[in-house]
Amino acid sequence: MFSKFRSLIFKIDPETAHNLAIKSLKLNILPNIADQNKGDPIFETNLFGKNIDNPIGMAAGFDKNAEVYNPLFKLGFGFVEVGTVTPLEQYGNPKPRVFRLVEDQALINRLGFNNLGAENISHRIRSNSHKGLLGINIGPNKDSEDRLNDYLIGLRNFYDIADYITVNISSPNTENLRAFHDETKFDELLNAIEKEKVKLKSKIPIVVKISPDISDEQIELISKILIKHKVSAIIVSNTTAKNREKLNNILKHQKGGLSGKPLEEEANKLISKFYKLLKGKIEIIGVGGVDSGESAYKKFQAGASYVQLYTGMVFQGPNIVGKIKKELKEILIDEGIKNFKEIIGKKLTNWS
């Protein structure tokens, strides 16, 4: 069904098309999702102590203002992450700021954390209880004079209503945000979050979303600090500011973060590297180019225990979770696998 409308949708400005998708979900104008594999034991798993139907999540960036997380659960997502949410409302960067690269099955965005702010979004979630596992992605305001404190404000706003909180230190669209990948700054940030959790008497799982544009030395340092602070999970990875050389679309040099298929292989390599270093102590959520059963399969083989997507739904449509599950199940059955977790980290050498 989506393929019939895709050419029409792709004639619309990407950000306008996204806003229309949000409105459609808010109005409960949902496609007929025929998920033949709902509740299938082959996908059953547990995330942060809660059972979920499947390991496929919606990445942050789609539902920035926590408007449609429950409709997204209806689309079959095993978990949903909203945001990025900043302490204060902000418009983000000037438009146009989203670019669709059809030939490359990719997006470039430079949105810049546009959102309604922590207080508004917290109120929205409190008045609309979530019907599935909900993560909230937090970040600092662009003009903040104390970005570390902005993360603590986010934590205070959401610790009692989220199932987990993601600390976003990796968007390429907020200037100098990636400075938090520095060993000292990263350690200080996680230490401050730990202390704030103690003050709040909270055991909320903390997840860190990292950049794909990091060196092997940074990977090792980040891994040590994650283990030191007993972070619950790492999201590998955010969009990349690199990897433009092999793209075909004329818009490939637009400034911003690149997501989708061109990120897939690099993300898998990064997942594998973190998997070897973290040694099962910290969960890995794999992101980048997930749009099929095969792409999810490769993420699990590389070492991810869960996957997230966003760009894949732009190109494959709202039934993408059902599509991935159907294709993945066929692969797993052919290999005699009873649950997808059996393949996690089984082909690390492919991505080294």
Image (cartoon, helix red, strand yellow):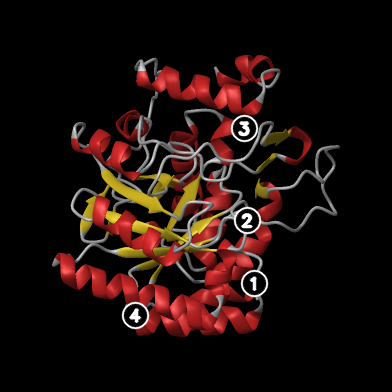
Residue positioned 58% across, 22% down in the render: 17
Give neighbour class at mark 1: few <14, some 14-19, many 20+ (Cα, 10 Å).
few
Instruction: Identify which amino acid the numbered label 1 is placed on.
Output: Ile
Q: Is residue 75 above or below residue 305?
A: above
**Mark nearer the N terminus (4 vs 1):** 1
Are the residues at dot 4 and dot 1 in contact (C-beta closer than 8 Å)?
no
Q: Earlier in the sequence, mark 3 or mark 2?
A: 2
> Label 4 is placed on what type of residue?
His
Residue kind at label 2, given as amino acid type? Pro
Q: Circle 2 sits in a helix, a strand or a loop, which is it?
A: loop
Q: CA distance from mark 4 to mark 1?
A: 20 Å
User: Which residue carries the number 1 mark?
Assistant: 214
Given the image, on which type of amino acid does mark 3 rest? Phe
Report whether residue 122 is seen. Answer: yes
N-term mark: 3 or 1:
1
Dot 1 or dot 2, earlier in sequence: 2
Cα gap from disc 4 to disc 2, whole angstroms: 25 Å
Tell me what residue is drawn at x 44 percent, y 35 percent.
Answer: 322
Residue beneath the point at 18% across and 53% down: 160
3 vs 1, front mark: 1
Q: Is residue 110 left or right of residue 117?
A: right
Name the residue carrying label 2: 172
The residue where tag 3 is placed is 315
Of the 4 image quadrants, the one containing the C terminus is: bottom right
